[in-house]
């Protein structure tokens, strides 16, 4: 997917924790969230991230868009370009947490990820993000939503996502 002029990259990352948020088996993950989110916010090319309180509402509320799952762990963010997001995901402290995903996430539920282009200045809502994600699930890669494999310049996921 070629980045259109005047657009940034939005991403939604969804996962289901194996255990409740207060379970000691996921405390390394929980205790590291501020560190990982802080690294994102300091990263070159970072634009915006949905506020954790708003994200928690979307994840646990019957009025939210994510099915009221209390073990949902997700992020919704916007980046200047693919290279910026790719660097953050695979070359920062985020990678250390990614490498431990099997400890914390229900891998049977599969970690889920979708990207799409947004006009510069746009901040996607969770409803928009979930619609993009569901479109990707139903129709596969297209201009509405895509994964790393659809972005020619993204290469790190091929070697660093293993394990």
Image: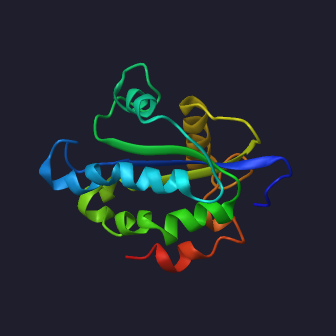
At which x and y percent is residue 48?
60, 42
Image point 30% across, 55% down: which residue?
105
- Name the image colouring: rainbow
At which x and y percent is residue 156?
57, 75
The total of numbered circles placed on residues is: 0
Q: Quadrant of the N terminus?
A: bottom right
- Can you name the residue that lies furthest to the top here? 63
At which x and y percent is residue 154?
65, 70
Image point 78% across, 47% down: which residue?
7
Image-quadrant location for residue 99: bottom left
Q: Quadrant of the C terminus?
A: bottom left
Image point 54% across, 55% down: which residue?
42
- Can you name the residue that lies furthest to the front here? 42
Please state if 21 lies on the left or on the right of 7 as rendered: left
At which x and y percent is residue 59?
38, 33
- State whether residue 76 is above or below residue 94: above
- State whether residue 97 is above or below residue 41: below
- State whether residue 56 is above or below residue 148: above
- Can you name the residue that lies furthest to the left here? 24
Image-quadrant location for residue 87: bottom right
Please state if 99 lies on the left or on the right of 128 as rendered: left
Nearer to us in this view, 161 or 86: 86
- Can you name the residue that lies furthest to the right here? 5
């Amino acid at each position: 997917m070629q980045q259109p002029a005047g657009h940034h990259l939005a991403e939604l990352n969804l996962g289901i924790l194996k255990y409740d948020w207060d379970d000691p088996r996921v405390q390394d993950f929980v205790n590291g969230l501020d560190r990982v989110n802080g690294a994102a916010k300091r990263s070159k090319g970072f634009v915006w991230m949905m506020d954790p309180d708003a994200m928690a509402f979307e994840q646990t509320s019957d009025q939210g868009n994510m099915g009221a799952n209390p073990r949902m762990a997700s992020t919704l963010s916007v980046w200047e370009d693919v290279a910026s997001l790719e660097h953050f995901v695979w070359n920062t402290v985020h990678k250390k947490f990614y490498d431990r995903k099997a400890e914390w996430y229900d891998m049977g539920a599969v970690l889920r990820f979708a990207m799409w282009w947004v006009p510069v200045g746009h901040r996607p809502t969770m409803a928009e993000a979930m619609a993009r994600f569901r479109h990707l699930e139903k129709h596969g890669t297209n201009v509405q939503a895509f994964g790393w494999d659809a972005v020619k310049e993204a290469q790190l996921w091929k070697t660093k996502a293993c394990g």
